[in-house]
Image: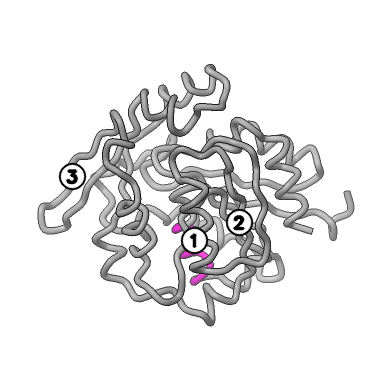
Amino acid sequence: MEENQQKHFVLVHGACLGAWSWYKLQPLLEAAGHRVTAFDLSASGIDPKSLDELRTFPDYTLPLFKVMESIPPDEKVVLVGHSLGGINLAFAMEKYPEKISVAVFIAALMPDTVHKPSYVLEEYFARTPMENFLDTQFASFGRPEDHLQSILFGPQYLSSRLYQLSPPEDVALANSLVRPTSFFTEDLSNRSPFSNEKFGSVKRAFIITGEDKTVTQEFQRWEIENTGVAIVKVIDSDHMAMISKPSTLCQYLLEIAK
């Protein structure tokens, strides 16, 4: 593939997951002739930090900032975020809008430019009954004054809510690799909205996961209506589209990146 046709995809994983969650998608994008950067966010995957070392959402996002800093000034990346990774995307869009050709949200939390960054999370929890979280564990961590809460997906939640259409070996893999993370809701609630000039200037695409039991299609469509996107696609998958439908997801990403 000629250099001017080659795209650089930067893949941002969701809560409790890591770069490993892209293991099926990455080789498909590379086989199509593109560059792919998949990495662990702080205290995720095999990142050496522990959750106790983090206080804020930018602390959690730091590895993405480092990736974006390494991008040459004349290059633009296709920034792809899954689930909670959508908020990581928003921070990068605000900080490096000139380095992103398009931001792709896959069943992802997508902030707007009107409300605080915590708004979309607060709406999600308001619309999601606590019993839906099944054996997911919530726990306090860090200093009491920081009001930090961790989340760790349980085996039942993984198999029936995230991976219900995925191969059983991938469910087993996820069970062995998940780590606790945090939504850092208190931190996000104390921040100003993302700006129209930076975050709002980046072209956005959204891939709806049609059979999602974690972030429902109804909620994903509400987000699209709330924030607005240039391109919307629907994939017939569970929450883990990169695991259950990697080939279709790859095709959609290539179409969006053109």
Disc 1/disc 3 C-alpha distance (Å): 30 Å
Q: Is residue 74 left or right of residue 173?
A: right
Q: Earlier in the sequence, mark 1 or mark 3?
A: 3
Q: Earlier in the sequence, mark 2 or mark 3?
A: 3
Total marks placed? 3
Dot 2 alpha-carbon crowd within 10 angstroms: few under 14, some 14 to 19, many 20 or more: many
Dot 1 alpha-carbon crowd within 10 angstroms: few under 14, some 14 to 19, many 20 or more: many
User: Magenta span has 93?
Assistant: yes
- What residue range appears in magenta? 87-94
Dot 3 alpha-carbon crowd within 10 angstroms: few under 14, some 14 to 19, many 20 or more: some
Which residue is at a point 65% across and 57% down the rendered structure image? 232
- Would you name the residue on which mark 2 appears? 206
**Callout 3, which amino acid?**
Phe
- The image shows residue 225 at horizontal and vertical percentages of 53, 66
User: Magenta span has 200?
Assistant: no
The circle on residue 141 is 3
